Image: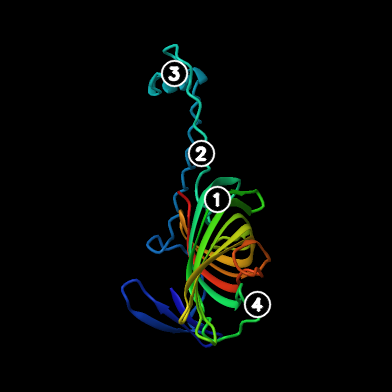
Amino acid sequence: MITEQVPRVSYTIALLGGSVHVNKSRDVVKITKEKNPQLAVKPAKPTPPAPPPPAPSVVSPLMVTSAVATMTPPGPAEAGEPMPEPEPASTDVAPTARVRRERKGFAIDAAAVVAFPLAYFADPDTTDASFRPSLGFSAVLGHERVSKNNIGITLGFQLRAIPWRYVSGDGETYDTLSIEPEAYLRVARYQPRFSVYGSGALGADMVNTDLTVPGVGAFRSQSRGFGMNLGLGGALILTRNMVATADVQWHPGTTTVISDDDGGPTVTYAALLFGLRFYP
């Protein structure tokens, strides 16, 4: 094998035994090519073609029907009995983030009332500091219906009781209990986890007063008149059946219809209500 050639100078020849000879160009008469069987590259074997994909199996519809018939247990219809109709989902649940549309059911509200008096029925111009805020209680039993657009309307009955105490400048003490039975309406807009609403109540004001006059004695009077409450509030959904509520309300003093004293308006007050609504 010629490993190096310098034109017109020399040829470097490597033999099979490993020896290397350098011959001058003038000593080389003829150069021929011959294949070395030990260095010849064997041709690669051809890759056999991939086998064709298996043909899709064809299942007879009769076979499928037979398999389903074998796996399906006999129902009431096969025994000659009518198939029972599915029971409709109950709608008497609380409005929650997941249950919202076309709901109806009873609702019970219970709230503490922090009332801030603005005027007293016996003296509409009362501003005496001894006429202090009072703590009362309010309850509502109603029926609510929620429409498809998440508007809930509650109609019901409200009962509220608030005790008052007023001491006049001359030492007269008025211990009063106002009771308000009223028809109740609430319109709410529901969101995923809370709601906002406006409320109103119309009914009667029943004011029972025990008057104590120093050196004279005690007297009792009663006033009956038209009562009204207007409010705005919001609710936070706690569980599926319970909602926390907070309201701001105004109760105007209205003229009494039946009175054992000199008449005049009933108690005028603003109130904060904090409570819970339950869906039984």
Q: Position of residue 233 (x, y in %)?
A: 59, 67
* Disc 3, SS: helix
In the rendered structure, which disc, 1 or 2, sits on the residue that comes first in sequence? 2
In the rendered structure, which disc, 3 or 2, sits on the residue that comes first in sequence? 3
Task: Report the Cα–Cα distance between label 1 and label 4.
Answer: 33 Å
Q: Is residue 228 visible?
A: yes
In the rendered structure, which disc, 4 or 2, sits on the residue that comes first in sequence? 2
The residue under label 1 is 142
Q: Name which residue type carries label 3.
A: Ser
Q: Nearer the viewer, mark 1 or mark 2?
A: 1
Do the residues bearing badges 1 and 4 touch, measured as CB atoms within 8 Å?
no
In the rendered structure, which disc, 4 or 3, sits on the residue that comes first in sequence? 3
Which numbered circle lies on residue 89?
A: 2
Picture colour scheme: rainbow
The residue under label 4 is 124
* Disc 4, SS: loop
Task: Report the Cα–Cα distance between label 1 and label 3.
Answer: 58 Å
Which numbered circle lies on residue 66?
A: 3
Q: Determine whether 89 is above or below 111 in the image.
A: above
Q: Nearer the viewer, mark 4 or mark 3?
A: 4
